[in-house]
Every structure is written in C-alpha cells, then in structure tokens.
Image (cartoon, rainbow, N blue to C red):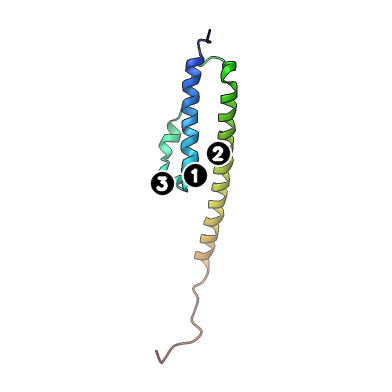
Amino acid sequence: MAEPWTDAWSHALDAFEMDVAEAEALIAAGHLIDSAPASTALAWQAPTNLGPLPGSLRDRAARILERQLDMAARLADAARSTRQQMRVVDDLRKQAPVTPVYIDTIG
C-alpha cells in the first residue's frame, strides 16, 4: 500500500523537476536575464504538509537535488563571469579618450 503522502511528494518533485529543467534550458540558451522574470523566482514557496519523503521517491529526490545543486553552481559561475565582464566594461569607460597623434591634412 502506498504511503498517504506519496502523491503529494510526487507532485512536488514534478514541480521541482520542471523548475530545474527550465533553468537548465535558459542557461544552455544563454538567456538568463531576459527570459527569467525575477517575479517567478520571488513567488516560489516551499511546499507544505508533504509529510516525510517516501522511501520509494528517495532516489528521484536525490537526482533532482543533484541537478539543483549543479544549476546553483552554474548560475554562481555565470554571475561571477558577468561581474568580471562588467568590471572590464567600467574600466574601459574610465579610460581617457585616445587623442590623435597626427592630423590628416590631405585626406
């Protein structure tokens, strides 16, 4: 007989899996900012009243968690890379404009 909370956990894991798949697709396509509104992430709430994780779903939950942790690391790397690129752009803006050394009087 299935544990009473198995269906609730299955639905919660389905939602987690879809969220991870969406994040994976976005980062693979390189569309993190334009395609992922912050309101979606801010609206997320942890599921409640799920009860203990059924043993039959433990492996699936572990695989989803592994994918989530991988995505978190990839997003952190992308954020770090973006900050580095922004610093380079800011440095380029701060450089004095190049003054011509010669004046073309013929052309």
Which residue has dot 1 on it? 27
Q: Look at the numbered disc 2 and give the secondary structure of its residue.
A: helix
Q: Quadrant of residue 53?
A: top right
Which callout, 2 or 3, points to the residue nearer the camera? 2
The amino acid marked with disc number 2 is Met
Type of amino acid at the residue the image marks with label 3: Asp
> Which label's residue is closer to the chain start, 2 or 3?
3
Mark 1 or mark 2: name the one nearer the start of the chain.
1
Q: CA distance from mark 2 to mark 3?
A: 18 Å
Give the residue drawn at x 54%, y 47%: 78
- Asked if the residues shown at circle 1 and circle 2 are in contact, with their CB atoms under 8 angstroms apart, the answer is yes
Pick out the residue farthest to the front.
Answer: 1
Q: Residues within 10 Å of mark 1 (few under 14, many from 20)?
A: some
Q: Which residue is mark 2?
A: 71
Q: Which element type, helix, strand or loop, lies under badge 1? A: helix
Badge nearest the viewer, 3 or 1: 1
Mark 3 touching mark 1, by CB under 8 A? no
Residue 34, relative to residue 11: is it above or below?
below
Q: Is residue 28 visible?
A: yes
Tell me what residue is drawn at x 39 percent, y 89 percent: 107
Q: Is residue 46 visible?
A: no
Q: Element at badge 3?
A: helix
Residue nearest the observer in this picture, 69 or 60: 60
Any mark on residue 34, and which?
3
Distance from Cα at disc 3 to Cα at disc 1: 11 Å
Q: Nearer the viewer, residue 86 or 35?
A: 35
- Picture coordinates of residue 80, whole percent (x, y): 57, 49
Reading the chain from its start, which is encountered first: label 3 or label 1? 1
Q: Position of residue 76 (x, y in %)?
A: 57, 43
Binning the other alpha carbons within 10 Å of mark 2 as few (below 14), some (14 to 19) or many (20 upward) gives some
Residue 17, given in percent of the width and then of the height, sits at: 49, 30
Q: Residue at x 49, y 87 (%)?
A: 102
